[in-house]
Each structure stands twice: as structure tokens, then as C-alpha cells.
Amino acid sequence: MPSFKSFFLEKVIKLTVKRVGGKSLQKKGIKERRQKLDTASKALRMPKNCMVEPLDMDGIYAEWLSYSDSKNDKVILYLHGGGYGYCSVQTHRTLAARIGKSAGVKVFLPEYRLAPEHPFPAAIEDAIRSYHWLLEHGYPSTNIIFAGDSAGGGLSIAASLVLKNQNERLPAALVCLSPWVDLTSSGESYQKNGGVDPYLNVDGVRKTARMYAGEAALDHPLISTIFADLTGLPPLFIQVGSHEILQSDAEKLAAQARKAGVKVTMKVWDGMWHVWQMSGEFLPEARKAINEIGNFAKMIFSR
């Protein structure tokens, strides 16, 4: 059963999104909307003793997140969500830091280019650049895990598919939190959960999908990776909530991956919403979910 805190927090999120993310915000320019998200995210508390090291990765801003006891030879490449058009290192630093702490490894958090200024495939190109940068700096592919939430989850899959098609070394595993992998919005949860999802709505998701795809088809296998051949991908770990319109995305991804022979670990969390893991220490389900991510990463890295 979902905790009382989750019930309370979901109600607060619904009211906040309705008040802050309503029509008045949509009338603002995209840069101002991005700034609003960055400002709101400053209320998220970083884990104690997390060290943040900013760097310029060949023109892409990125950060190293680590702790005094982090294993320096292993890394999670974290790709933030935000519909490919929103969010940043600022909005996702806390979530990435908590995952790194649970896994006991460093996190590399790049700020890839965003749509509509930089539509598909710019984000994929930047994700691959980040991976190559890690390889060039001494991290073998077996010591790198791709992780991401929402669009970042889809980006993790898409980047891995490009690497596979180019016969390059793949990361050790993929971690997808509430992955956005069907930009055609064809899953049943888009209708079934439309009234309960506190964050996302179908119309907004469809507009964001078109903004990212540009002139490309929404069912392009690198845009909606549920339509791709997933054969040969590394082990896949998925978390999704039962109150998300993206629940079907995660379920279809898992089904397609298993059909292709990929080892899949997936869990649908009862009563949870889109990327509830961001709720951090306040929410018991967030703490447990992040702990499970950490245990998966430790298992992969111990091989």
C-alpha cells in the first residue's frame, strides 16, 4: 500500500502544478518556463557531503557528483528528463546525487542540448559525446551505467542503440525511471491514467513530443524506442508508477526488450507518479526506489 505521505504529497503536487503550471505559464516563452523550473528545483535538498565538481566537456556543461567513499573507477552517466526541451543539471542534481550515493559510485551529469532550438537527434549526439568522453578519460564500458528519468530514460536507450549500430562497446547496464519511450502516445495508460497523473497530461506530452521530433516521424525507432530492435542491449532496470500516463511506455519497453532477449528487471510502483524518486528523503517510496537502484548498480558493477 502507498504510504500516507505519498497520498498527501500527490495532492500537493496536483494543486501546485495546477497553480504554477497552468495557462499563464504556458503563455510565457520557453526560456522563462525553463527558468521557472530551475528556480523551483532549488528547494530540493542535496544529500550531505556531496561534492559537486563542474566542468566543460568540449562545450557541454557537466558536473561530477561524488562522496568521499565513492568508487572512483565506476560511474553512472545520468541523463536528465524534461521532455527533451526542459530541465537541466540544476533540476536533476539532487536526484542524481542520491542515486550515486546509494550505488556508491561517481555520477557524471551532462547538460545536453534542448529542443526546439536543438531537436532530434541533438540530445542523442550529446549523450554519445558524454559516453565517449568517459571512455577517453579511462572509464571502460564495463564500469559505466547509463541512467535517466523520463526523456532521459528514452535517451539512454536511444544512445545505446546508436552505439550498438556502430559496433561500439555498450555500457554495462541501463537504468530507466518512468521512461518516455513512446512519443506516439499509443499506450492505454495515456487514457487510463489521464485523470490521476498529477504531473503530466496527454496534450502537453504530445506537444512536447512534436517539439523534440521536429520533422521526423514520432515512431522513428530512435525517438520512440519501443519501435526499435532492442537485441543486444545490456541489462535493463525499469521503475514506473501506476499513476503515470507513461506506465504503458515502461511496460511496452520491458516487453520489447524481453522479446529481444534482453535481461529486464521491472517494477510498477502502486500509487506512484512520474519520477517520484525526486521526492528524496521525505517520501518512503522514494528512499526505497533509490535504494533498489543502488543495489542494481552494485550488482552490475560487481560482475
Image (cartoon, rainbow, N blue to C red):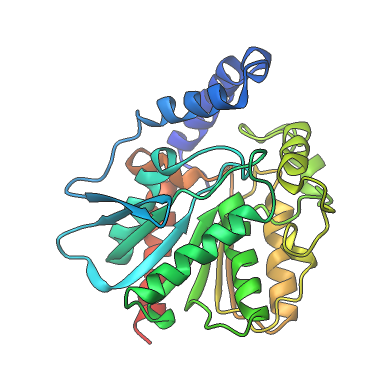
**Image: 196 above or below 33:** below
Closest to the observer, 128 or 255: 128
Residue 41 in picture, x, y percent from top left: 41, 31
Q: Quadrant of residue 76?
A: bottom left
Residue at screen point 56% across, 24% down:
33
Residue 292 in picture, x, y percent from top left: 42, 63
Residue at screen point 16% across, 65% down:
69
Residue 65 in picture, x, y percent from top left: 29, 54
Residue at screen point 38% across, 75% down:
136
Answer left or right for 34 relative to 77.
Answer: right
Q: In which quarter of the image is the C terminus?
A: bottom left
Q: In which quarter of the image is residue 71?
A: bottom left
Answer left or right for 244 relative to 215.
Answer: left
**Image: 194 above or below 147:** above
**Image: 60 above or below 227:** above
In this rendering, the count of numbered labels is 0
Closest to the observer, 12 or 254: 254
Residue at screen point 80% across, 47% down:
185
Residue 179 seen in the figure: no
Answer left or right for 288 relative to 68.
Answer: right
Residue 303 seen in the figure: yes
- Furthest residue to the front? 58
Residue 3 in picture, x, y percent from top left: 46, 41
Q: In which quarter of the image is residue 245?
A: top right
Closest to the observer, 255 or 157: 157
